[in-house]
Every structure is written in C-alpha cells, then in structure tokens.
Image (cartoon, coloured by chain):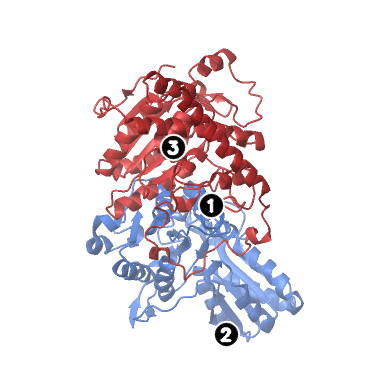
C-alpha cells in the first residue's frame, strides 16, 4: 500500500505540507515512539492477552503529541499507553493496570488499557468498538457549547470505521462543526480479517466526503506526516472550522493479542512492512539530518528501557485489588456531588509530562 | 398552585433548570420549531434558542454518546430519544458508556445527563414499547417513571441536578390527560423513594406509570366490594424502593405488581422476588403479577386493548390474592 498525503476531498487542502517541524519536536516524537515500543513489549511479556502496538507507534505519537493540557484525547485501544504517558501518566501505574493491580488508574475495575480520566482522556470502560467515538464527539460538543477553543483528538482502527457509531458521530460532528480530529489508525486488520475483505473503499479518508468534512490519508509510518496532518486538523478545529478525518496508514506487525499465532497473515507482506518499521525509520531520519548522533540515539533507547524496567519492577510489587477496590456501593455517585466546582471535569493534567519532549 | 398536564409538568421542569443553570441544554429530534414529539418540548426553542435547544439528525447512538461526552466535560445535557421504541438503537451508549463511566474510573468521573423518552400506549398508538426493565437491570443508571404532573416536573428537575445518568420514561397516555395541581415551588424530589398514592390495609398494589392510575381505579372498585387497597407508585425503578413496598406488604400481607411492560422479566418480577426475600413470611398469599402477554405489541385497537393491562385485570388480580390467602 502506498500512502501519499493525498486529500480525498478535492475542496480540502493540507495547509502545512511545507511547514518544517522544529528539531526539539522531532526528537520528542522519536523519544515517544521508542518509549511505546519498549513499554508495549514489556506489557506483551507480562500479559499474553495484551494488544500489541508494534509498528503503529508513529500514528500514536504523531496524533497525540502537542495537545494542550485542557484538550481531551480518546486514543484507540491499541497502544494508548503512549498517549497517557505523553500527558503525564505514571508508567508504573500503567503497567500495574496491564497486570490488573490495585495501583492501576481504575483500581482493577476497568480494562487494562483504560486511560486516566483525570488527565484528560476518554477512558475505556467497555470492550466494544465505536462508542468511544460518540463519547469523544460529545466532549467536543461540550467545548463547542461553552464556546471554548478546546479540542478533542480521537483515534480508532480501520475496523471501527465499519461501525454505525463512527458514521453517526462524524455526521453529527460535521453538522454542528464540532472541534474534533478523528484519526484512523489503519493497521489493515480487524483482528484476523484484512481490510481488503471488509472495507469496500480504497481509503478510509474518503469516507469523510460523505459527511462534508476534510479527509486526508497520510503515511502512518511517518511520524512527522501524521503529526502535521493532525496538527492541521487541530488548528482548524480550534478556529471553529469543524472536524477533520485523518487516515494514518500503517501495519500491525504483531498479532491481535500478544500470543496470537496469526495464522491468517501473509508472511511476505509482513516482512515487507517490517522493513518500513516506523521506529528505526524515524531514528534514521534524525541521524541523517544531523539532529541527533548515534550516542544520542542510543541514549533514547537506554532511557526508555530504564524507565520501563523501573516501572515494571514497581508495578509487580504492587498489591492486587481488594474488596475496597471492588466498591460494591459505587455504581452511582452520591447525589450531592457537583464536579463543576473543579475548573473542568476532565482536563488540565495534574503533573508534568515527562515524555512530552 | 398551577394546574398542569403531565407534559406541561415535564416542560416546566426543563424550563426551570434551563433558566437556572447555563450548563443545561436539550438535544433531540424535532424539538425546535415543531415543539417536540407530542409537544414534549413546546415553547423551549422560543425562549432558549437553537444553541441550547439543539435539533439533531436521526442518530440516536451519536446523540446519547454526545450527551455522555458533554456530561463528562461538565455540561448538563438532556437528550431526548423521541420514543422508547428507539432505545435499542442507542443501547450501547447507555449500557456500556453512561452506566459504566463513574464506577470504572474509580469515581473520577460523573456523568450528569438525562435521557428522556416516551413509552406506553398513547392517543396515536405508535411506539408504545416499554423497555424500562432493561435499564433497571444495569447498574450505574437511575430509572424514573413519574405518573403525575407534579412528579413529572420535580423528577425532571431532580434528574437534571443529579450527577448520575438518569433515564426518564414518560408515559404517553398521561401526556395530555387530566390536569394535576402542581405546587409553585419545585419540591425536594427523592430519586430513591416510591410514593403511596392510596392507603389501604388488605392488599398492596405496586404499579408504574399509567398503570398506577388503573390501580387507583381498581382500588376504588374494590372499595365498593369492601376491600381496602394500598396503591404504591414505584416511580423510581432503579434504584428500586423495595422498603416502601415491603412496609406496605407487612401491613397487608398481599401484593399485586402491575405494569404495562411484558410480565416476563418486567420490573414486577424484580419487585415480587425482592418482596419474597424481604418478607416472605408476612405473605398470606402468593404474589400476583399483572403485565402484558409474551408476544410483540399489536397495533389494531381491539388487539391493543386486549394486550395492555386494564383496570379489570388489576382488579381481578387483587381479587385473586384475596381468594388465595
């Protein structure tokens, strides 16, 4: 699959195709991708039912890098830990979640890949695909309603674009010009089905035309391309221009889950995509452009390995959830609670964002 | 004291909160110039404009998702699903998202949204399905079914102010029916309490929506036969106020549960099971359930009339629990 940055909507044009990204952002993006590669690998080793993001790091880093602290992010379930970490989530608490420990952000109540809601994420509280798109669109409605310039970035897989929720949400967002960027993390697989069997269009981005919104397909293994396209969408959304659909075309190098034998895959295509692995590619670009040297590149990997190793050790020591975490009386909130006394319900990140760059 | 119809009570509740709280808005189909299905939002677009009274496309799942997300970021949305028959089209947003978010974020988030919808047989006979028990089954939701104009207003206000997702079932037969006295000031409405509508000593009837009124008519008939019937309006189906029903049963020793929904798996099944657990040895007769027969809802009037529980079928159930004890 070739993946030029071709607008599917002839009326839409990429505004920043010639804008260069500053070196510090380039390094930060690569640093984030390396963290994702190492962190996801650790999660796969700890939990054979983990959904590996290997090969898709450029989409995640590019889509969620540089969001404002008061924006909302709704990352796809494959690889969301990077998005959480980029906004200040604790690596050890994330690993604790993957291990279903009490220290996880949901105290063992939600799926391992859920996000910390108080850091501005739409959490994963259900195992279906598509409803988070509706909820993320609702966050954008909240921002539109209060006439703020906050935005939402919401990612999902190519398979999810066959859900009715995708179509209803994009239509609604376009009708109301909601401030949201939809990012399709197109890894070409719906579990075992290749996209060619279930997507009757050449490009997910082309579906944007049906809803009167701009749609762009970009090389999902090129982190700079992904980031530019999403950033343009964010700029448009902040200015009141409404939603954008970005299709980032990539490839799932791993199985659907970590121990998936993947008998349905075509090995030579897989090997071909492995040569386009976005992580070494992004590192090579930085080296070629003289932004970092070999020592600097090695340091990025060492930092990520050290941080993940420390997080794994700490998470493993953590306790399992107890009856207190079960919270049998917690299904409903007390009626006198009013979260509007906080500046925003989910919003500004609490701590720093060490992996932001 | 104003005399309002049920639907006027609902609208008054929304208007009250739209005036009081700028974070409150309403979205739904045909709620603007048309005034809402069955006039259910009449007058609101004129007062509050299209930014707060938002017309939506026919996209129930996106509408409910939009309410969940807006609530998540601090708004107080009311989303109107025109008729309960359409709830299956947005079930995943209600059950998987709205209901789960508070618990599964370990209490970080609250989802202060109201989903209002119309159910039951009505003057036009369309969309009458009563699916409320599905939602009472799922933890994380409040489920309300008012039966008077005063409750319609006050339940709406309390639902809007509550930090949880609340589903408000509005019975269409009550919409443009008799007017009720509605106090000028909004009352403190307890979202977890049923209401005793008529005191009695011989038989307890617990009912919902329009069937509360049928139970009151049946009680009147039975009074002429010398039977004293206590009628409880369940009002809050989730959490269910079993305490009020159990207190009544401890007094009367007999219970009939009546609703318009299908009897199998209806809320009456939960009420009778909970009463069996709470006060089995107080019962002098097996509980009786009155509900619709187990087939899809027919359209023609004679079929519909045979299908829906009537004053006569409630009265017959009361007589039965009297005979059997």
Residue at numbered disc 1 = B95
Residue at numbered disc 2 = B199
Please tell me which of labels 2 and 1 falls first in the chain. Answer: 1
Say above or below: A293 vs A241.
above
Left or right placement of residue A324 versus residue B72 in this view: right
Say above or below: B233 vs A42.
below
Q: Nearer the viewer, mark 3 or mark 1?
A: 3
Q: Nearer the viewer, mark 2 or mark 1?
A: 1
Say above or below: A216 vs A71.
above
For chain A, give the colour.
red
Position in image of residue A62 (x %, y %): 40, 33
Determine the secondary structure under disc 2. loop
Residue at numbered disc 3 = A155
State the separation of the CA atoms marked 2 and 1: 37 Å
Say if mark 3 contacts mark 2, CB within 8 Å.
no
Chain of the residue that carries numbered disc 1 in the rendered image: B
Same chain? Circles 2 and 1: yes
Instruction: Name the residue nearer the viewer: B110 or B67.
Output: B110
Q: Nearer the viewer, mark 3 or mark 2?
A: 3
Q: Which mark is residue A75?
A: none
Chain of the residue that carries numbered disc 2 in the rendered image: B
């Amino acid at each position: 699959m070739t993946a030029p940055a071709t607008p599917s909507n002839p009326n839409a044009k990429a505004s920043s195709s010639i804008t260069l990204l500053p070196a510090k952002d380039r390094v930060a993006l690569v640093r984030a991708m390396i963290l994702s590669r190492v962190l996801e690998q650790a999660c796969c080793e700890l939990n054979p039912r983990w959904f590996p993001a290997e090969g898709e790091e450029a989409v995640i880093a590019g889509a969620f890098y540089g969001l404002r602290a008061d924006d909302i992010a709704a990352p796809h379930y494959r690889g969301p830990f990077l998005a959480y970490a980029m906004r200040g989530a604790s690596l050890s608490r994330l690993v604790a979640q993957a291990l279903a420990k009490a220290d996880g952000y949901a105290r063992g109540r939600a799926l391992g890949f859920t996000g910390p809601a108080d850091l501005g994420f739409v959490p994963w509280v259900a195992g279906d695909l598509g409803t988070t798109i509706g909820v993320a669109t609702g966050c954008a409605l909240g921002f539109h309603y209060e006439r703020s310039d906050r935005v939402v970035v919401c990612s999902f897989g190519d398979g999810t674009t066959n859900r009715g929720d995708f179509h209803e949400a994009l239509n609604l967002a376009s009708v109301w010009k909601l401030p949201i960027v939809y990012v399709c993390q197109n890894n070409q697989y719906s579990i075992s089905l290749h996209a060619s069997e279930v997507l009757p269009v050449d490009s997910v981005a082309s579906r944007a035309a049906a809803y009167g919104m701009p749609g762009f397909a970009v090389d999902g293994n090129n982190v700079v391309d992904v980031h530019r396209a999403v950033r343009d969408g964010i700029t448009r959304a902040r200015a009141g221009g409404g939603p954008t659909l970005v299709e980032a075309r990539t490839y799932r190098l791993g199985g659907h889950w970590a121990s998936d034998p993947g008998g349905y895959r075509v090995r030579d295509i897989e090997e071909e995509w492995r040569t386009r692995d976005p992580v070494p590619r992004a590192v090579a670009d930085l080296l070629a452009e003289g932004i970092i040297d070999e020592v600097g590149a090695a340091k990025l990997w060492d930092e990520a390995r050290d941080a993940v190793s420390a997080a794994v050790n700490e998470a493993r020591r953590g306790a399992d959830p107890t009856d207190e975490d079960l919270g049998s009386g917690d299904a409903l909130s007390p009626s006198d609670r009013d979260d509007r006394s906080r500046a925003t319900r989910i919003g500004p990140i609490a701590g720093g964002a060490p992996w932001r760059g | 004291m104003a005399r309002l119809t049920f639907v006027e009570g609902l609208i008054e509740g929304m208007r009250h909160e739209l005036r009081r709280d700028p974070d409150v808005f309403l979205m739904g189909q045909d709620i603007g110039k048309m005034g809402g299905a069955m006039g259910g939002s009449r007058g609101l677009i004129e007062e509050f404009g299209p930014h707060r009274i938002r017309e939506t496309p026919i996209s129930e799942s996106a509408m409910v998702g939009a309410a969940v997300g807006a609530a998540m970021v601090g708004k107080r949305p009311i989303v109107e699903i025109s008729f309960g028959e359409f709830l299956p089209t947005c079930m995943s947003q209600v059950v998987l998202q709205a209901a789960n978010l508070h618990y599964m974020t370990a209490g970080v988030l609250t989802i202060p949204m109201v989903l209002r919808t119309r159910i039951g047989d009505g003057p036009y006979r369309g969309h009458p399905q009563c699916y409320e028990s599905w939602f009472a089954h799922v933890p994380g939701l409040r489920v309300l079914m008012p039966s008077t104009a005063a409750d319609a207003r006050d339940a709406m206000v309390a639902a809007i102010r509550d930090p949880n997702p609340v589903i408000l079932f509005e019975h269409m037969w009550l919409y443009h029916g008799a007017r009720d006295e509605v106090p000028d000031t909004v009352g403190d409405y307890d979202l977890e309490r049923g209401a005793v509508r008529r005191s009695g000593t011989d038989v307890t009837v617990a009912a919902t929506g329009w069937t509360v009124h049928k139970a009151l008519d049946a009680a009147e008939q039975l009074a002429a036969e010398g039977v004293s019937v206590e009628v409880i309006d369940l009002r809050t189906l989730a959490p269910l106020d079993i305490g009020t029903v159990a207190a009544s049963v401890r007094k009367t020793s007999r219970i009939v549960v009546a609703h318009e929904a299908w009897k199998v798996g209806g809320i009456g099944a939960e009420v009778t099971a909970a009463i069996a657990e709470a006060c089995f040895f107080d019962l002098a007769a097996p509980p009786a359930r009155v509900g619709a027969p187990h087939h899809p809802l027919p359209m023609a009037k004679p079929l519909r009339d045979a299908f829906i529980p009537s004053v006569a079928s409630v009265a017959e159930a009361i007589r039965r629990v009297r005979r059997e004890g």
